Image (cartoon, grey):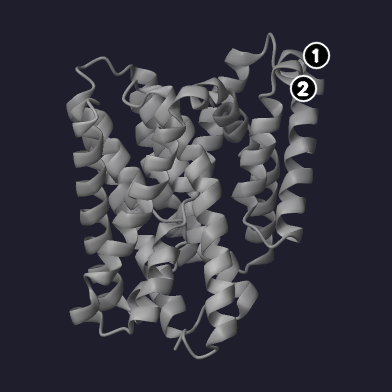
Amino acid sequence: MPLFLSITLIILISYVFTRLANRLHFSSVIGLIVAGLILAIPPIRSLVVAGHKEMFGGLANIGLVTLMFLAGFEVSWNMIIKERRGALVITLFTVATSLFLGFVVFTVLGFKISTSLIMGICFGITAESVKARVLMQMGKIRTRLGSLLMGTGIINDIIGVFMLILVAYFFTDNNISMEEVWLLGGMLAAFFIGIFVHCLFNRENRHLKRLENILLATIVPFLFVNIGLNFDLSSFRVDIPILVLVITTATVGQILGVFLTRPITRLSWSQLWLVGWGMNAKGAVELAIAYIAMTVGILPSNLYSALVVTTLVTTTMFQVVIFRMVKRDPEIMN
């Protein structure tokens, strides 16, 4: 298929699945992941991607940098300031427990130290944009728990990006290429430029909102196409236990970390349970970190694929849990 038609088809399919996800009250990220996996089905891949893989790899890198800009653009310092003490405490505890569990579990299983660290980092990342969409939809973003969840997501993203760069720097045995160095640097720079733009302009500025929608529709999809192309479905024929272990370890690490903060945050157990599921929701930043780790040779394909599925599962579970808990106790968010 000619390149122009391939690009047009990818953008169209991504748009359709993004709109479908939004209609079903799921994050746009879920729609993009599903679109990427569908485009990776062998017959579709051979029709749409064949002959253009290198070009799509370059577009995926641009999509990654764009996605990190949009992740930074989501950041609201007002949310951090509003619940700064609780947000910082919960972030530090959940990152520490997730990193510890991920490192111990995967080191015991025989994976390299760098791989185990990356798994721990990915387990500690949370999906700020997913939480923002759900909370806004429910009208709960300005509640105590809403502000707390948003504040933790922001701090969490910043810590995760820095930890990825440290692991990539110290554990790649100088095999990292200049292209990958530029990609890491571009990712970090784009994230903070996004934060700066948010501080400089109102996020609801219609021109910026339009730009965000255009970037999500035309550039970011190529990252998720590449995520789909690198998704190894065949690995699950023998690695279902690994998938279950990844989802379980990620979930236990986040919820345990939140529970440990009870003496400091003074939240009820039911509130901590809700926050724990909110912290466990994965999204764009976790996938970006996994993608970079795989690109520089730290993360094997079976674990990378497991993290993609974990994103789908944990994001869906968060939405199920919060809707049920708020329906049962409308005041739980305050």
Q: With 30 as the anchor, is 96 left or right in this view? A: left
Instruction: Write down the quadrant of residue 162 in the picture.
Output: top left
Q: Is residue 256 visible?
A: yes
CA gap between label 1 and label 2 equals 6 Å
User: Toward the viewer: 113 or 156?
Assistant: 113
- Mark 1 packing: few (<14 Cα in 10 Å), some, or many (20+)? few
* Residue 79 image point, x, y percent: 41, 74
* Residue 197 image point, x, y percent: 48, 58
* Residue 311 image point, x, y percent: 50, 47
Q: Quadrant of the N terminus?
A: top right
Q: Is residue 140 visible?
A: no
Q: In this view, which residue lies farthest toward the top?
A: 51
Instruction: Write down the quadrant of residue 279 in the picture.
Output: bottom left
Q: Are marks 1 and 2 in contact (CB under 8 Å)?
A: yes
Compared with residue 280, is residue 267 higher up or lower down, i.e. above or below?
Answer: below
Residue type at numbered disc 2: Ser
Residue occupying image coordinates x 33% and y 84%: 268
User: Toward the viewer: 227 or 315?
Assistant: 315
Compared with residue 154, is residue 267 higher up or lower down, i.e. above or below?
Answer: below
Compared with residue 120, is residue 41 higher up or lower down, i.e. above or below?
Answer: above
User: Toward the viewer: 205 or 124?
Assistant: 124
* Residue 218 image point, x, y percent: 69, 39
Q: Quadrant of the C terminus?
A: bottom left
Residue occupying image coordinates x 19% and y 40%: 104
Compared with residue 25, is residue 2 higher up or lower down, i.e. above or below?
Answer: above
Residue type at numbered disc 1: Pro
| Residue topped by disc 1 | 2
SS at mark 2 in the image: helix
Residue 49 badge: none
SS at mark 1 in the image: loop
| Residue topped by disc 2 | 6
Q: With 4 as the anchor, is 194 left or right in this view? A: left
